[in-house]
Amino acid sequence: QDGVQDFVRIRRFVLRLSLLPLLKRQLVITKVELLNPYVQVLRDPSGRFNFETLSVLKEGPARVRKAPKAKAEAPALPVALMVKEIRVKGAKLAFKDALAELPKTDATLDLRLSLALGREGTSLSYKGDASFEARIHYGEIEGRVKGKAKFDQREVHWSMEVKGDGQELRITGGAKDYLQRPQVVLNILSDSVNLEKLLALKEKVLRKGRKGGRTTKGSRGPQRKAQVPLPDLKLSGQMKVGEVLYKGLKLKDVQSLYEYERGVFQLKDLLAKVAGGEVKGRATLDLNPPLPRHEAHLELAAVEVAPLWKAFLSKGEGVVRGTLQAELNSRGQGLQWEVLRRRIDAQGTYSLKEGRLLDFKPLGAMAVLLGLEELRDLSFRELKGNFEVVRGKVHLRSTLDGRQVRAKADGEVGLDGTLNLPVLLELSPQLGDRLKRKAKFARYLVAKEGWTAVPLTLKGSWNRPRVALDRRFIKKGVQKALEEFLGEKGTGRVEALPGGFLKGLLGR
């Protein structure tokens, strides 16, 4: 385009023919060799590519289209064609973008190919192999792809290594019927993957795209009807990763099978070792319009919950410890949280043994109300229950069995963090005695074996909880105390109650 830099060049071109087969109407090319072909694609600051000035790409004068004639059979070729060997050695492709919107790429290729074409023009056959390598630079990101492939007109097989930002993947597989309805097998293997680095890499790509991308004001243009993504593609394979790292959490021996067909992606037989235990699962994601739909099943067995909590759920608040056993089934629509939280249904069970809850705001609010600092740090033998997620709310039923505190909860926790959760605390005789010295009503609320039952309600939100005594249970306790007191006095008259009784009953 600029008359200075080469678009295409080649060091040497060799063509060898065999003439005798022409007597049998066969064109036999014994060798085609291209040595060090070089293609350089450039994009200038105005967004134009250097190949746009090629005459073959320019539009010619408009031609009047004639009415199509009835389709006739394609005429036979004058000769059959056979190319015994095509060799491409040291081919190079370079791409540079002055706008920095597209990655800078330097690629090399070695290719060996043979082909044959019959006189009828339809019986094309070929086979060959290739090796390739590409280096990619995109802002702060550098990557390298290196691999080999073997192919013919029916199928192709490949193996390659992908490296970038300290990550390395080995990809093997192949494809059948790849020119019409491809059936692809793609196996992904790695010794170690750092998920935080991969997510950071994705963010770098998006950030680079936002910086380099150009936007056009005005209409978006006609809206295209949503379609099945890649409707002709059938994809399957397996993933095996020795170790996955994420925020201090290590998943070992991660493996799974997967399939994709007609817009539906399935993850099968997921298995991983994590935090001393094991995770199993499966999932289905249907990408067909109008909204993506998904289903999942997950099982956790003998998993230490602390690293999971820190990596995925804590948001810097609270400590959870214990050994977790859990099972979850879910289904929903949408991928963005604002849509998903209104369209997800889930059910599950859980059991957390020999555990501890520390520094949670709802526990702190209970401790302040009852004057018992021990509630800020709860150790327990088991916390178990079940839950159901419907229309953005988690219907929770749970029991806690501890040495100092027992509890039952049956209520709702919103996916937005709102609380509507009645909790019945049962305090050990030691804690119950301390509460009775602080709140005289507690002496009339006694459970089995001397444990003091304290009915509470949790309102507000997870970050700003409001805790109050449940008045319904307090009234029952007062009624029982009144009946016992009146029974002792031998009268049913309220006037017989000593002064200050009610105040002493309900006050601190």
Image: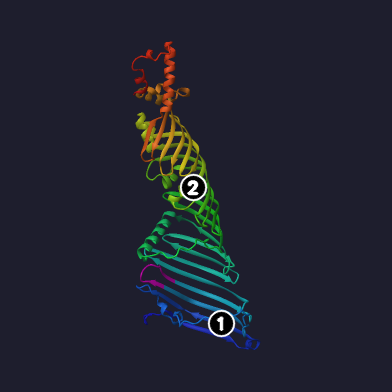
Instruction: Identify the mark at residue 256; answer none if there is no mark.
Output: none
Q: Picture coordinates of residue 46 (x, y %)?
A: 35, 73
User: Between residues 331 and 384, which one lies in front from this camera angle?
Assistant: 331
- Name the residue rendered at 36%, 32% in the picture: 367
Structural crowding at the residue carrying mark 2, measured as other residues with C-alpha within 10 Å and reported as few (<14), some (14–19) or many (≥20): many
Q: Secondary structure at mark 2?
A: strand
Magenta stretch holds residue 168 = no
The magenta segment: 95-106
Residue of label 1:
31
First-in-chain label (1 vs 2) = 1
Q: How is the image coloured?
A: rainbow
Marks 1,2: beta carbons within 8 A: no
The amino acid type found where label 1 is placed reads: Lys
Give the alpha-carbon distance from disc 1 to disc 2, as whole Å.
63 Å
In this view, the mark in front (1 or 2): 2
Which quadrant: the C terminus? top left
The one nearer the camera, 118 or 358, is: 118
Label 1 crowd (10 A; few <14 / some 14-19 / many >=20): some
Mark 2 — residue?
344
Taking the view exactly as shown, the residue that stands out farthest to the top is 490
Percent position (x, y) of residue 384? 49, 36
Vertical arrangement, residue 306 with respect to residue 410, above or below: below
Q: Is residue 189 rendered to the left or right of residue 363?
A: right
Question: On the rendered image, what quadrant is the N terminus found in?
Answer: bottom left
Can residue 196 be seen here? The reply is: yes
Q: From the top left corner, tell me how far across and down residue 36 is, in percent.
A: 46, 78
Q: Which of 388 and 82 lies nearest the eye of the viewer?
A: 388
Q: Is residue 427 visible?
A: no
- For the residue marked with disc 2, what is the amino acid? Ile
Residue 320 is left or right of residue 277, and the answer is left
Please tell me whether mark 1 sits on a helix, a strand or a loop: strand
Residue 186 position, x and y percent, is: 54, 61
